[in-house]
Amino acid sequence: MAYPKLTKQPGALETAAAIRNGSMSPIEAVEAAIARIEHHDAHINAVVVTDFDRARDAAKALGKRQPQADEPLFGVPMTVKESFNVAGLPTTFGHEQYADNIVDKDAEVVRLLKGAGAIILGKTNVPPDLADLQSNNPVYGRTNNPHDHDRVAGGSSGGSAAAVASGMVPCEYGSDIGSSIRNPAHFNGIYGHKTSFGLVSRRGHTHPAAGGLDVHEGPLSVVGPLARSAEDLTALLEITTARPLVRREKPLSECRFLAVLEHPVSEVDASVRVPIEEALAELAKAGATIDRTSALLPDLAELHADYLRLLNVAMARGRPAPGGKEMSLVDYYLLLDRQARCEYAWGDLFAEYDFVLAPPLPFLAYKHDATPINQRRIMINGKDSAFADALAWAGIATYPNLPSTVVPVGSTDGLPCGMQVMGPRWSDLDCIATAGAIGKLLHG
């Protein structure tokens, strides 16, 4: 199956293994990653905040001792999304007014990654307020797709995915409320995991408008890992979650999948449908059961409408849009009731199916476009379409609080294409493992 080859650079666990067996030192791993960033990033602009001197110091300190059993990423260099607080570095969320917002405490995810031995080289680019499917802001500029610099790397974890796909770093940590992990993974040809809602702490992944104070973890938004392999996703997730997770290890030949490629709100372009259909054909050859319809599938048009309402509340924290009005507390709780019923309906579906397979978005990486997202248009199967309708494929997993792993499945005209592997809430390790099995089936 045609697919743009991922970088040959070693992954996170491979790097950690090389350091443990003595074939590489932490400082050698860090210097190599810095060299890759300095070489590639002039054209990509993914790693927009660098912390190389402190990374070198951390690597030298690690090099003076042996890794411990609870340090699976000992000496592994990586970056994190700009929206995560890293002590001593700025958190701007893409706004010039916060360019000097130097924080004094690590986000919880960053603390856990450092505790596992990872070395943070810097932070990667985002759109303002993490509110677009491309990463371009007045503080740090625009991130380009490594496969085609005229196209977007995605957003809001666009810098994250571009840094991983280009080989600058082996892994990353991002966040997702409107496919912000999934669309960059899809656009760049890597793995990305949207976690079950509430699985990983978002403490310290906070808009600078909060003035450094902790905030309530509102609905829908999650944080999760990006990497070039499912194994690395698993390691990153196990490091950063405090909740015990169980893995079933079910082979593909015994899995029952529901493939959802039709949505009443968003048509899927052939550039995405064809690689996914080819992947489904390979799954069927491997013995998997794949259904195309089910009476158990919730009403997707209704789901999308409710998702957009809750998304707008979550992004604006209840403030009205221009000409709009605030949502009342009563209406908010009624919407949460609808969300709960939707989650129960998906639970019934997953009593019959192991996983749901769907596109992450209905199109591939598109040309850079400065038009506001709510006014942006895009061609889908030759038809002028509303760009924002693509969020229908984000909400299918986000609104019911489900985990979803994007696995690279193929390409069209040299641009990568991914597929979502969705499972019941808390089945994160199963989703990642199955995505990894699909990747191995397709690409060896």
Image (cartoon, rainbow, N blue to C red):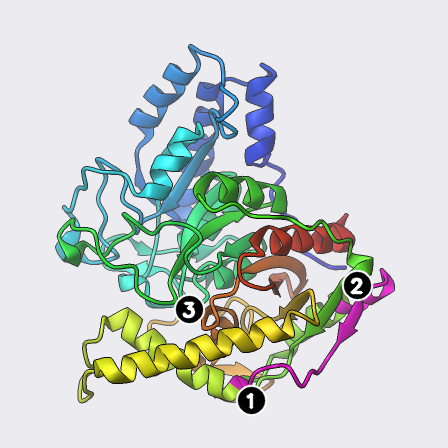
Q: Is residue 290 magenta?
A: yes
Disc number placed over residue 283 in the picture, else none = 2
Q: Which mark is first along the chain, 3 or 1?
A: 3
Q: Which mark is first along the chain, 2 or 1?
A: 1
Is mark 1 in CB contact (under 8 Å) with mark 3? no
Specify the amino acid type for callout 1: Pro
In this image, 399 relative to 208: left or right?
Answer: right
Tell me which segment is drawn in magenta: 280-300
Specify the amino acid type for callout 2: Leu
Q: Which residue is mark 3?
A: 178
Between 167 and 305, the one lying in front of the other is: 305
Specify the amino acid type for callout 3: Gly
Q: Which residue is mark 1?
A: 264
* Mark 2 nearby-residue class (10 Å; few <14, some 14–19, many ≥20): many
* Mark 1 nearby-residue class (10 Å; few <14, some 14–19, many ≥20): few
SS of the residue under disc 1: loop
Q: Position of residue 364 (x, y in %)?
A: 55, 69
Q: Which residue appears at 18% of the width and 87% of the height?
A: 325
Q: CA distance from mark 1 to mark 3?
A: 18 Å
Q: Which residue appears at 16% of the width and 49% of the height?
A: 212
